[in-house]
Each structure stands twice: as structure tokens, then as C-alpha cells.
Amino acid sequence: MGLFDKKYCDICGEKISLLGNRKLEDGNMCKDCAHKISPFMTDRRRTSVADMKEHLAYREANKAKLRAFSPTLTLGEREKVYIDGNAGTFVVSSRSPGNWDNENPDVLSLGDVTQCTLDIDEDRDEIYRQDADGNNVSYNPKRYKYTYDFRIKILVNNRWFDDIDLRLNSFDVEGMGTAEYHKYERMGNEIRAALTGAPTAQAGFAQAGFMAQQNFRQQGYAQQPQNFQQQGYVQQQNFRQQGYAQQPQQAAAPAQWFCPNCGAQNASKFCQNCGTPRP
Ligand SMILES: [Zn+2]
Ligand SMILES: [Zn+2]
């Protein structure tokens, strides 16, 4: 068994080029044949030659399915979910339908979807300041930049693979509660609803967040009149005048602040990351 032993593809019979070998459980396949494997199949090395021949026959039949596929709904941005509402089928691909020939993305039945989840991965990077010597120094308390990735995991009943993963956002999404964040959250929920027909748990989660913020606001409003009552009428007048004078300034230049609880940078009244009111 040397590096220069000649190997032949157990699928097509052609000689396998140097570095062109793709291992199967009980044999070898060439690059050209390996290229035809479903983009969602991940366990080639654990697939037998006999099973791989069946898989490639299934992949060949998929080409005809793909020609008959006519999307009525397209969701997503980077990787897209194409749904043929008339046929009850769907395709996941980062390419547009005009460029599907080479990739041959699997046409799957909506009925084969057993579960679809939206995972939002949070990544936290500390923000440093530089001291006089140019060294990175932590703020006290520490400050962070929060970024998010939105991932859809589709579990399917299929002989050749169990799940399809796709990332919705092209670039890191900065900050929870930003317009970008909500855009991808909405996109994920649309995909979940389209693939499973189920109302989404994430929507409920978002509502809970919104209600928590509402509660904060209500508490804020509730506390003010109580203070007013204790302080008396004259002070209340002063407070109102100060309040009116300050408001236009705040609206003109919303100052950036860092949350004392989680360290996220904010511009609005409440931390967009954890809901803590501006100090
Ligand atoms: Zn081959
Ligand atoms: Zn916070």
C-alpha cells in the first residue's frame, strides 16, 4: 500500500487521480462521482459502495424532480428555502434556480419535515480601551459587543441525511433588539411556519421580552407620581419644567451608554440586550 498504488473508482470504474480519492466504507470513489453526492449528506466514509450506488441513482432521479420544481415562495437571504406550494415540496440552496444544474439540490417533501428550529447564537467580544502605552485595558465594569448568528435546523425523514442546516444572516448581526436582529428573527419564524405550519415559540419569546420592557416602563411611570405626591406641588412644578427643558436635548443627541448589568452598548432607554433601564 504505497502512495502511488493505482486505485479505481468503485462507482464508475475510472482510474482515480493522485489526491483524487474519496474513501467509502468498503472502497473508493473518484472526485467526479463524489461531486454528485447530496450537499446534505455528511457520512460518505461510513457509506458502502452498494449504498453509494443507490444514493447516486436517487441523485440522478432528483434532476428530473428539480426540473419540475417551481417555487411559489422564497424565504431567506444567504441560504434560501424555496417552496413549491403546488407540489408540496421544497429545496434549500444558496444558489438561484437558474444555477441549480451543478449542485442538484435535493427536492424534499414538506411532509418529510419532522421539526424545524431557529437557533440564535450569541457571541460576546469584550471592548477594550487603550492606556497611555497603547495596551488594551478592560473597562470597569467590562464592556462588550454582542453579535448574533441565526441558524435554521430542519430535521427530515430521509434515507440519506437527517438534517439540513442553514445560516440566515450573511454577516454578524450586532445587538439584540436592533432592526437587523428583528429582521432575521422574523425571517426564521417565517421559514419555520412555512415548513411546519406551526406557530412559533420564538414569537412568544419576543412577546415576553416586549412585555418585560412594558413592565419596566410601567414601573417607571408608577414611581414618578408617587414621588411627586410626597414632594408636594411646588417641587412638582419644578420637576416638570426641568423635564420639558431636558427632553428636546435628549431627543436631538441620544447619548451612547453601556449597560451596568451586561456591558452592552445602547442608545435607547432600556438595554437592548437585557432590558435594564438606562442608569
Ligand atoms: Zn467515479
Ligand atoms: Zn444589559
Image (cartoon, grey):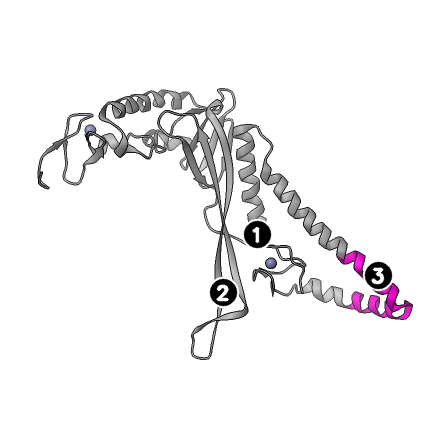
* Label disc, if present, on residue 176 of the rendered structure: 1
Does the magenta portion include 276?
no
Q: Which of 130 and 229 is in front in this view?
A: 229
In this view of the protein, can residue 166 be seen by the observer?
Answer: yes
Q: Which residue, given by chain and number where applicable, does mark 2 sit on?
A: 127
Amino acid on which the number 3 mark rests in the picture: Gln
* Label disc, if present, on residue 74 of the rendered structure: none
Q: Distance between the residues labelled 1 and 2?
A: 17 Å
Q: Residue at left 43%, top 37%? A: 165
Residue 21: image x %, image y %?
18, 36
**Would residue 11 be found to the left or right of residue 54 on screen?**
left
Q: Residue at left 53%, top 64%? A: 143
Within the displayed image, which quadrant is ligand 1 positioned in? top left
Residue 257: image x %, image y %?
61, 65
Q: How crowded is mark 1: few (under 14 residues within 10 Å), some or many (20 or more)?
A: some
**Would residue 202 be found to the left or right of residue 221 on screen?**
left
